[in-house]
Amino acid sequence: MMMKEGSSRIIAVTLTLLLCFLTADSEVRCIESERHALLNFKQDLEDPSNRLASWAAAAASDVDCCDWIGVVCHNRTGHVLQLHLRTFHPLYDELTEDGAQYEAQYEAHERSMFGGKINPSLLDLKHLIYLDLSYNNFSGIQIPKFLGSMGSLRYLNLSHAGFVGLIPHQLGNLSNLHYLNLGHNDYEYNNNNNYYYYYLYVKNLRWLSGLPLLQHLDLSYVNLSQASDWLQEINKLPSLSELRLSDCRLSTSIPPMHSINFSSLTTLDLSYNHFKNTSIPFWVFGLHNLVSLDLSDNQFQGPIPVYLQNLTSLRHLDLSYNTFNSSIPNWFYTFSHLEFLSLGGNILQGTISSSIGNLTSAISIDLSYNELNGKVPRSLGTLCKLREISLSVNKWSPQISEIFESLLGCISNGLESLRMDDAQLSGQLTAELGQFKNLVILSLFNNSISGPIPWSIGNLSSLRFLDLGRNQINETLPQSFGQLSKLESLSINSNMLEGVVSEVHFSNLTGLTVLFASKNRLTLEVSLDWIPPFQLNYLGLESWKLGPKFPSWLYSQKQLLSLHISNTGILDRVPPWFWNLSSQFYYLNISHNQIYGEIPHIPLILSSISIIDVSSNNFTGPLPCISSNVTSLDLSNNSLFGSISHFLCYKINEPKNMEFLNLGKNLLSGKISNCWMKWQSLIALNLGNNNFIGKIPASIGSLTSLQSLHLYNNKFSGKLLSLLKNCKGLFTIDIGKNEFDGTIPKWIGHRLSSLMILSLHSNNFYGQIPDELCALTSLQILDLSHNKLFGSIPKCVNNFNTMARNNNSNDPLFLSVSSVAYSSTPFESELLVMKGKSLEYSTTLQLVNIIDLSNNNLSGEIPKEVASLQGLQSLNLSSNILTGMIPENIGDMGSLESVDFSVNQLSGQIPQSMSNLTFLSHLNLSNNNLIGRIPSSLSASSFFGNKLCGPPLTDNCTINYVKPNIESKRSKDFGGLKVDWFFVSMALGFVVGFWVVLGPLLWNKQWRILYFQFLDHLGYKLSGVVAQTW
């Protein structure tokens, strides 16, 4: 029997070998029907780079589809098994990848992506088990339902491919599926610069139950907010080993789990969901096979949970950007297999234990953006495998030299990235820096590092990214910088460097693409024919000395995208080649120089976010015509002249992308054209300090996005305010020093509720100040001075909430657009009268709270409610007809620095509480009817024209003045009423004087006769004198 079985096996093997031998030379070709299916599939695909050129529609005898690119067939049957149509996305590793090379690869990737539609002919590929269409661009189409009928599929990857809409539940029919990746699908739709984003979504995940063999599931970016059953359905997948649900809008609480069926899970990613849970669900700690756990960017809080130590297999742990607020527990350092650790963006406190040296497998450690303090332990230097350390934004105490000493162990041989930005470091960089020869990234931005940059920095031969910006580094730049041949990005801005920079400093920097060195006192001295070895994309040399000639070496920088050379001492014309070069810029700043000449028309095709700032120069001539793609244009503070019409109406039918337009402080004149209809993107408009005349056209009311309007110091007229009714986003209206008229409309308080600055001074506005103005709760500056307003001051001024607070933001006022924020220049400035002087505020404008109602015809009393404005710094009510007394509680206005109530009809005494105004440095109460003692000593000129006494006046209240009763004592003789002895003595003096003169005349007849004879004689003489003069 055994002999029979053995011989049978030998025969079977022999037949198999014979069959293989006979068929070895016979070519296996693809199935004809499947070839046609592929050709039909190709027909609906968009293939811009012709990647599928090999998919030719020739005769079957000539073409084998198994040889086509991306097609894998069965080696015996010829059936199509796999379609590999991924467009390979370049992976950027900042430690190893060349930035320019990556950019070129990414552009090539975008050019080669497939698009179009998915043809149902794929259904004819009955044996297809593998379909990869990832990293393409199908431009917002839905995932085809027919894919659910491809029952042989084991691998389906549609990630990063631009699919949107409802995921078809038919995918649940793919019972053989092992791998499903639908992650990172979205589509951006641009409609006139209004961007709309679309994503995949589901109503439930019940269809997952039809995929019992699934091992890998990635639904990242899919909107699962309607799938309340997500965890229960995923728990039905017992073979699952990888689960990625990043950014799925799972903002509800993670439900508890009594039993876990996917216990073999090795990878779990629930990042970017912002769960309502305050702690990590307990079932996570039961996944003992986990190798990678990412719970970043959620809302977990409290101490780091102790149960994490049960996950002993972890190699990748990311808990960043939650609100864990404990110290790092000692057991945390027992993860000996951990390679990647990220705890950044929490509120972790305390010090780092020396036990961190136990993380012997660590490759990357990120503890940035916490509140850790103390010193960096030396044991960190013993982690020989460590390549990346990020300790930025903490409260470290050591000198920078101690940091490098701590890292001089075996780590120094392999360390590639060290980030300690904003880490409160001080001290000086020392020569030890040169021993970290494998450093690719060194970032020490925004610390207090002082002293010179050591010469040994030239030894960092692998360095690609160096950021020493915002420190106190001084002396000159070492010439050894020229040895950093791999350097791509250098930032040394905002330091105290000085001296000369020459060609030697750049001699070998052939790969440099980013140079930010603004705000230093450096001088560039190079030959006139110098051609730099680099091609920069970004250049910032603000405050360097580059002039007086315009730097000719910029001509060689053909790839420049951003240029900032403001305040560099250039006294020259702009050469014509530069204006041609500027067509590639998306940021250009040559402001605050003495550049002269005319600005040519710039109607070139610029980037969609182009920013141009040529302000504060000596440019002359008419306004240039500008490309519609420019988003920010600052031509202010030059000598440009002529009309604005050709500028506004250039390509009138083409929508403008302009968000910020500043033409202030020029010599522009004439009327404003009615061409604002296409400027719908405008957020800030400044036409101030020019010579414009006439009425503002009605089309300015169509600028519904407008936030800031400056028309200051022109000769505009008419009723502007009524045109702004639809500009509901305005928070600055500055139209002072014009000839506008009309009343202040009541609707301003409700329709322009965001107003922070309202300056209408020096116009012809009339009528009363409407009570509705008090609805402007964000108002900081109210200037209605020098108009023809009458009536009383509204009592509701206490509704100005911002003025009532003393906690204004310290941040300068910026536009809410990227274009102006990029330049870091405050967009607002105001000329304000404060402390009796006219001063311009810009960077500190956000700290100013003032009310100026001076030089009107306001009457009535100063409302006592004004005293509730405790954040107000200046109050000017001068030159009105105000009566009554100064509010007794004015001393509550603790922030007041300037008060002017002069030239009114105020009466009574100066309140004693005014002496509580400790910040008060300017007070003018002159030309009123005030009486009594002055409670605090200021300039005498502040009080003249009253009946006041006491310092600084010479009248000390004791010689010719009976001190008024200011202690509110009641007199028993007058029934408890107050007695003001000043008026009593005045009345008594009148009575006595009257009777002393007239009494004797009444009682003595002879005296009376002599008195009247004297008067007659005096009358005759006066009449004679008058007659002679006529």
Image (spheres, rainbow, N blue to C red):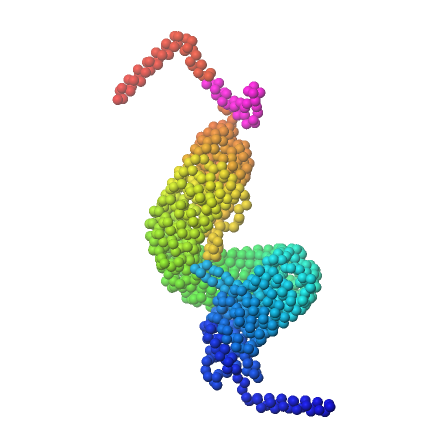
Indicate the quadrant where residue 228 lies. bottom right
Residue 487 visible? The answer is no
1022 or 25, which lies in front? 25
Is residue 142 something that shows in the picture? yes
Depth order, front residue of 474/223: 223
Q: Residue furthest right?
A: 1
Image height of 103 relative to 666, above or below: below
Q: Residue at x 52, y 68 (%)?
A: 143
The C terminus lies in quadrant: top left
Question: Residue at point 39% right, 8% down?
Answer: 1005
Looking at the picture, how far across and down is residue 579, in whole percent?
38, 62
Above or below — where is 970 with respect to 731?
Answer: above
Please give the count of numbered marks on the rendered protein: 0
Look at 46% across and 36% down and name the residue there: 793
The percent position of residue 999, horizontal first and vertical second, equals: 43, 12
Q: Is residue 28 above or below residue 460?
A: below
In the rendered image, residue 166 lying in the magenta stretch gets the answer no
Measured along the vertical axis of the image, is residue 280 above or below residue 96?
Answer: above
Instruction: Tell me the residue at 53%/75% (across/down).
Output: 123
Q: Magenta stretch: give its range.
A: 962-990
Residue 124 percent across, percent down from the top left: 52, 77
Horizontal and vertical percent position of residue 748: 45, 44
Residue 163 in the figure: left or right of residue 208:
left
- For the N terminus, the quadrant is bottom right
The foreground one among 1003 and 243 is: 243
